[in-house]
Amino acid sequence: MKKILTYILLLTTGYGFAQELNLPVWTQYLADNDFVISPTYAGIGDNMRIRLNGLTQWVGIKDAPDNQSLYADIRVANRSGAGISLYNDKNGNTHQKGLKVSFSHHLTLDYTSRQFLSLGISYNLNSFRVDVNNFQPTYDIPIVDPNINGDRSNSNNNFDVGALYRYGGFYFSLNVNNLLSKDIEDFRGIEPELLRNYQIYTGYVIQSKSNKRVEFEPSIFYQMFESDNRSSTDINFKYRKYNRKEDYYWIGLSYRFLNDQPFKPLNVGPMAGIMKSKFYFAYSYQITMNDLAGYNSGTHMITIGVDFLQGLSDCICTDTN
């Protein structure tokens, strides 16, 4: 049991460092909210989109990571878009809050074949805090170091950039997050200086030949951290069906693994969602496949949202179809 608890501590400590590198990406982007992945998606579509996500990781383990986030984007004029995201992330005694403000511009490469290029940029403001007031003596450490007092906090600014290419039902997104390195002169000990990470998101929306209201969407999400070359991949599949009013439901499955261990999944889970009269709801469940599997009931995520302020564009570069 002591070995398992040590393993949990190492995982949650690593997650705390990862918070400053980038907020954890689970399956929020699969809940018909690609803006989670990249600022290039801001303004694609005819409505202002608002999505609220709630995620609880490793349910059953005390002080496990917990995350809430709000995403909103809207088209500006005919060829541009803007968006904002707010988030609150908690992992034991570590807390992070912040926002992203994004801008995108969409170009038509070829009208006939429906080829589009979108470019985007985000400004990030993060606040990272360690709540040392919750530190309590333990059997192994009966006295808390008196030098540890007051909440330890830090704020930083950074930028993300991205490019999105669309060709019919195919899409390919490349993003570079946290362009700037971190100033660590005021810190002691081990601190991550290089925060950059890279993300690729690609997939294909396939329309059924027998039923035009049915779509199949395989996709892949890849993320790599420049500091230590850690990388992971999601392999996803979605089935979506529309009705005559353009309402729809979808079901899907996601498989995540470290790229040096492709046959040892980190998480596997089903997901489903529904859009009804511009109101949206989705649920995702991730089964933990590592040594923590026996001590938690997995990761749960709920997304609710609404689309409104419909406004058609004269440019097909913002069309979702």
Image (cartoon, grey):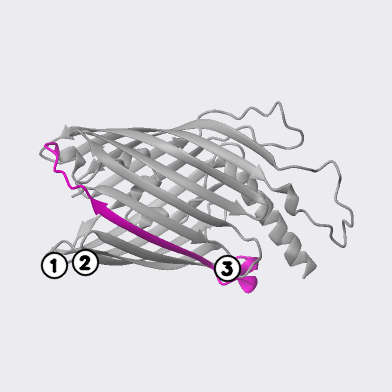
Q: Element under label 1?
A: loop
Q: Nearer the viewer, residue 321 or 63?
A: 63
Q: Which mark is residue 241?
A: 2
- Contact between labelled residues 2 and 3, with CB atoms less than 8 Å apart: no
The question of residue 291 being in magenta is answered with yes
**Location of residue 271 with respect to 102 vertically, above or below:** below
Residue pointed to by mark 3: 59
Q: Quadrant of the N terminus?
A: bottom right
**Residue 181 percent coordinates (x, y):** 58, 29
- Contact between labelled residues 2 and 1, with CB atoms less than 8 Å apart: yes
**Residue 264 percent coordinates (x, y):** 56, 62
Q: Nearer the viewer, residue 288 or 61?
A: 61
**Location of residue 93 with respect to 99 vertically, above or below:** below
Report how many numbered discs are placed on residues in the image. 3
The amino acid type of the residue labelled 2 equals: Lys
Q: Earlier in the sequence, mark 1 or mark 2?
A: 1
Q: Element under label 3?
A: loop
Residue pointed to by mark 1: 211
